[in-house]
Amino acid sequence: MNRATFPHRLLPWLLVAPQLAISFVFFYWPAVQALRQSTLREDAFGLKTQFVGLANFRRVLSDPAYVNSIQVTAVFSVLTAFFSMAIALLLAVQAEKVVRGKGFYRTLMIWPYAVAPAIAGMLWLFMFNPSFGTLAWPLRQLGITWDPLLNGSQAMTLVVAAASWKQISYNFLFFVAGLQAIPRSLLEAAAIDGAGSARRFWTIVFPLLAPTTFFLLVVNTVYALFDTFGIIHAVTGGGPGKSTETLVYKVYNDGFVNLILGESAAQSVILMVIVISLTAFQFKYVERRVHYG
Amino acid sequence: MARITLTDVRKSYSGMEVIHGVSIDIADEEFVVIVGPSGCGKSTLLRMVAGLEEITSGTIAIDGRVVNDLEPRARDIAMVFQNYALYPHMTVRENMAYGLKISGMPKAEIAERVARSAEMLELQPYLDRKPRALSGGQRQRVAMGRALVRDPAAFLLDEPLSNLDAKLRVQMRLQIKELQRRVGTTSLYVTHDQVEAMTLADRLIVMNAGVAEQIDTPMRIYERPATTFVAGFIGSPAMNILAATVTPDGAGLTLPGGAVLACPAPADPGQPILFGIRPEHIRAVTQPGGVGAIELTVLAVETLGADAYAHCAFPGHVTSAAEAMVVRLPGNAALKPGERLHAVFDTGAAHFFDPATGRRVGPRR
């Protein structure tokens, strides 16, 4: 390792200061605030504050609405992660086969990633809103009683579709890179060994993509847990009832709409713990799974 | 076990022909080596036999069956790749069993075949290792083993030794030859290394720019190269090829620099001709004025131990390093750059080529 030398003792601190300041203002400080808030009970106007210890956590964890939200989140995250990755992998494999205009297809595939979550949500809402959605009418003509404003599973389908669609581009990009890293000669050797294209995919390509797939699995789970707030807010607002209210949406709803600040803070602390353990799990697991020699 | 027949095989990439009609009939159990400089189309030709490249025209038949439109897996061949192409997520055992498993062979027979091949290649201690835990030579043997277990009609080997260090390369070369003799499988082997080609081949295909310049046994190619390209490519150091002119009396050659060599040439008096002589067919004599001795100026000497090679020029003739005449000397020859050397050419071992076409002329011997 090369030891960098600086002309002044303070210079290295000065250089990392902007990054540290951003992390401090947008992560550490709010995190500490959330931790402090989660032990307090406060009225909606902030006039009276009382220390209650872990009471907020006890209340949140025994609340059936919170348990429901955990279930909703699990279903939503698993479905979103699965569909966004499966479709992206399928498209990446197909894009590899394109002979002419490969770059053009890839560029088109990556565009949806540039759309903000709320805009993506609105897009899907305009297509599938039961009263004015462009595609709602044809769906009804097909004999499907389409009404995501009343039917919870249809609402879930809609938010999963919107959230997956948005993430496909990102996954596609990683899968394309992953596929390109697999030496062609391996596939040729497998072809000579007698493997057809489906067999080559499942016995050679898919196992060799495992590091990419696992990385994306964790990234997509985190995406589904947090970054889909905008989509849910725009499309269903957590409804109908609480059938699409994910954990992060409930944090917002309880804290900023219902102004139950203590419990909302406790929820965000729980969420933070979930994400930290997921990330730790990823780092421990990914390092063991990489098999490239 | 099979014959492989290539008939006027051609390959074009978007209208550009890169292989200009290669024909060869490879006998059962024969070991044929395709040798040529990089970019000559030798790997492409092999990949066409494997089914990894489409054949633009002509036919390839394995065991009498035209395989042009067959998938690689239907051709009953095994291939060893330059980078070995071992499946990195499988153990050595799984790598070797992969093809057999796909063919639906019973487990017991797979295990037996893998064990037998592993024994032949001394791979038993490594069967449960992944490729990344193996050395280059071991990986190469696994690649060989993967081909061997399949017991195919033919082995196709694409520069299988070029990623190994020099010592291991020599060792593996002998092992491959021995293995092929033992199992007797028809083999087609691609290399750019002429020593590998000479030592391994029953027959050689010397390729240059998409053309098979000569197809013959290594010794016959060494003794009677068909073109200046083959003459320069086979043999190390390369044959000296001099632009000479037949003397007016037709009894000798005027060499660059004006020296006259008594040597009948298959061309009319006064005509230019390319005169080829291998470094091992030139003898250096200390005494000037010997019969037919020609004076040369030493430019550089490379000592290899047993032999030394003197790079020489004709006095009074400007010669670049690439054009220098190479003369083989005993390893202990004490010559220094700038000194004179008197060379006697073994004209009986000389080769003549047409300066216009580069083809061999004059049936001598």
Image: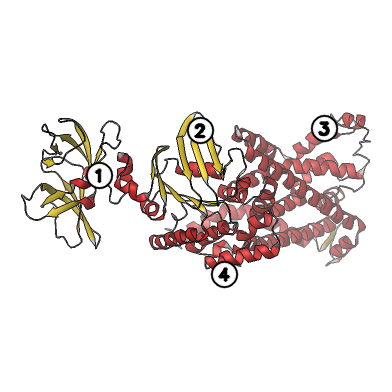
User: Residue B271, image x and y in percent?
Assistant: 18, 30
Task: Tell me if I can see residue A232 in this picture.
Answer: no
Name the residue that disc number 4 marks.
B124
Task: Tell me if I can see residue A200 in this picture.
Answer: yes
Do tags 4 and 3 sit on the same chain?
Answer: no
Do tags 1 and 4 sit on the same chain?
Answer: yes
Name the residue that disc number 1 marks.
B365
| Mark 4 in CB contact with mark 2 (< 8 angstroms) | no
Q: Secondary structure at mark 2?
A: strand
| Mark 4 in CB contact with mark 3 (< 8 angstroms) | no
Task: Nearest to the eye among marks 1 and 4: give it.
Answer: 1
Task: Nearest to the eye among marks 2 and 3: give it.
Answer: 2
Q: Secondary structure at mark 3?
A: helix
Q: Distance of mark 1 from mark 4, alpha carbons?
A: 52 Å
Name the residue that disc number 2 marks.
B13
What residue type is disc 4 on? Gln
User: Dot 2: few (<14), some (14–19), or many (≥20) neighbours within 10 Å?
Assistant: few
Residue drawn at x 56%, y 71% is B125
